[in-house]
Amino acid sequence: YDTCMFILRATLYHSASIPLLISSIFIIYIFCIAFFFFLMIRRPPRSTLSSSSAASDVYKRQGMDMVFDPTNGSSHYEDDDNEDDDRLAICAPSDIHEFVSTPFTDLGVVQCQIFRHKSGLFNSYPSYELYLKDGMRFMVAARKRKKTTGAYYIMSLSKDEISRHDKNFIGKVRSNFTGTQFNIFDSGVAADDKERMKNGSGELRKDLGFINYESNILGSKGPRKMTVALPLVNDQGQAALFTQSKDSPDVPSLEAAVGEDGNVENVENVFCLVNRAPKWSERLAAYTLDFRGRVTMASVKNFQLVEDQEDDRILLQFGKVGTDEFTMDFRAPLTPMQAFGICLSSLDNKLACE
């Protein structure tokens, strides 16, 4: 990098030298190609279909085996008086927004599929579609915007018209320039948008989640490390409110729950998740995680989220099963929108984490 910058500066100071300009462009091009292939040959975490350790039995009891379909009211837990099941059973297209933005309270696990549609040079601006695995019913779509400083994904209830100005716009996922921090927002008005706030157009934007990735240039620190801060959900299924309003500087934010080094801080009305640390396999010579067969392809983007490293209860897991196909399994108290937003952050390319 330093060599490329030196040549570029020298070219700028001697702009009359055309051969030097061509040579510098060629060298930078070769450097980029070499860097790309270096990333391609790295060994990412692999998924395993089984495990002989004692923890495998715990996965079987508390991991991602208890699957239910949230839209038909059936689950592995027989409770005919469960009002949440009744509410989800009558989910219709007009209720989809509430469905994807309401925290789940059932004890089961929701299995979903994510499909990627590539677009742009080197797949720079992809779009994604989220489906319930059972019946392959569409829920949410997302598209990466162009000409932004960091990653910027728009989430919509329509897979045909994904726009911030469309009625189906429900939220967005934004990152900083290096891709180490992501925010999940709903479709509300930003607190610093004085013109729209003055006109009273829309509700104040809610902060739905914050994801922090530990800086890891060229994978020098091993597998990815991520911390997720989410609004705490009470016993009635209501999530705490975070709006990032400048009028209330004393109100803690979701970012405050994650320190600069990625450590979890004690912040009121926030609960945090961390990715389950993969284990090194001497047989495979790679880091592995037990996805119970739901993930079949190795990828640095595969992850499982737990409340702490000693906890075997997985709240969200994500992984690759095809060239452009992924699985997403989550449980209460996450919403489909939060789970999808976290997965989008993992899918995005990161300058400081690759």
Image: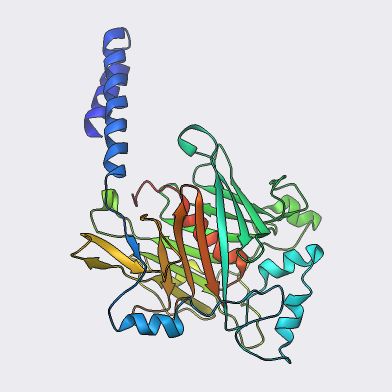
Front position in the image: 202 or 43 = 43
* Residue 5 spot, x, y in % from top left: 27, 29
Residue at 27% x, 16% y is 23
Q: Is residue 17 visible?
A: no
Residue at 27% x, 52% y is 43
**Please, is residue 299 above or below residue 274 in the view?**
above
* Residue 12 spot, x, y in % from top left: 32, 18
Q: Along the horizontal axis of the image, is 24 left or right of 90?
A: left
Residue at 26% x, 33% y is 34
Q: What color scheme is it?
A: rainbow
Q: Is residue 26 visible?
A: yes
Quadrant including the N terminus: top left
**Please, is residue 316 above or below residue 321 in the view?**
below
**Please, is residue 65 above or below residue 345 in the view?**
below
* Residue 335 spot, x, y in % from top left: 61, 70
Residue extending farthest left: 282
Front position in the image: 323 or 127 = 323
**Please, is residue 84 above or below residue 98 in the view?**
below
Occupied quadrant, residue 114: bottom right
* Residue 59 spot, x, y in % from top left: 40, 80
Residue at 25% x, 23% y is 7
Q: Along the horizontal axis of the image, is 46 left or right of 283?
A: right
Count of labels in the image: 0
